[in-house]
Amino acid sequence: MRYRTLGGTGIEVSTHCLGTMMFQAGFNPDHDDCARIVHAALDHGINFVDTADMYGQGESEEIVGKALRGRRDDVVLATKVHFAMGEGPNRGGNSRRWILKAVEDSLRRLDTEWIDLYQVHFPDHTTDIEETLSVLG
């Protein structure tokens, strides 16, 4: 497996990333099968795993968190924020308020103390970019 530095972070990631959008009901709801996929990727040198809070309304993050138990230190873990995670206002977007809530929820679902790469999934034209960038920093 080849590795590259992730931007200016000094973190080495595999040139292949395991995307987990399909780890959810309606695609592949078998959590054990999804864990086998994660383990096979890691066994082949992939150390970069990507998910998002909105994949299966958090189900993908839960599956990934379970699959990484005992192997979390070997993985560069990425997830995303933006899309609505429930009914009502203020349950999505790129506001400081929502990002702080969403990252805590993602950490819980992923069963980890840190996220290596936290990404904004989609622009939010109702939130000033400075607001979004300030909380990400």
Image: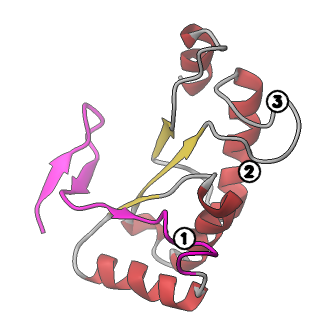
121 or 40: nearer the viewer: 121
> Which residue is at a point 52% across and 25% down the rendered structure image?
123
Q: Amino acid at mark 2?
A: Asp
Q: Which residue is mark 2?
A: 105
Q: Amino acid at mark 1?
A: Val
Counting from the top left corner in percent of width and height, residue 18 is at 35, 66
Q: Which residue is mark 3?
A: 90
Q: Is residue 17 magenta?
A: yes
Provide the secondary structure element on which disc 2 rests: helix
Q: Amino acid at mark 3?
A: Asn
**Distance Cα–Cα, label 1 vs label 3:** 26 Å
Locate the N terminus and report the quarter of the image it occupies. bottom left
Q: Which residue is mark 1?
A: 64
Which of label 3 and label 2 is nearer to you? 3
Q: Which disc, if any, is residue 13?
A: none
Relative height, residue 24 to residue 108 (above, below): below
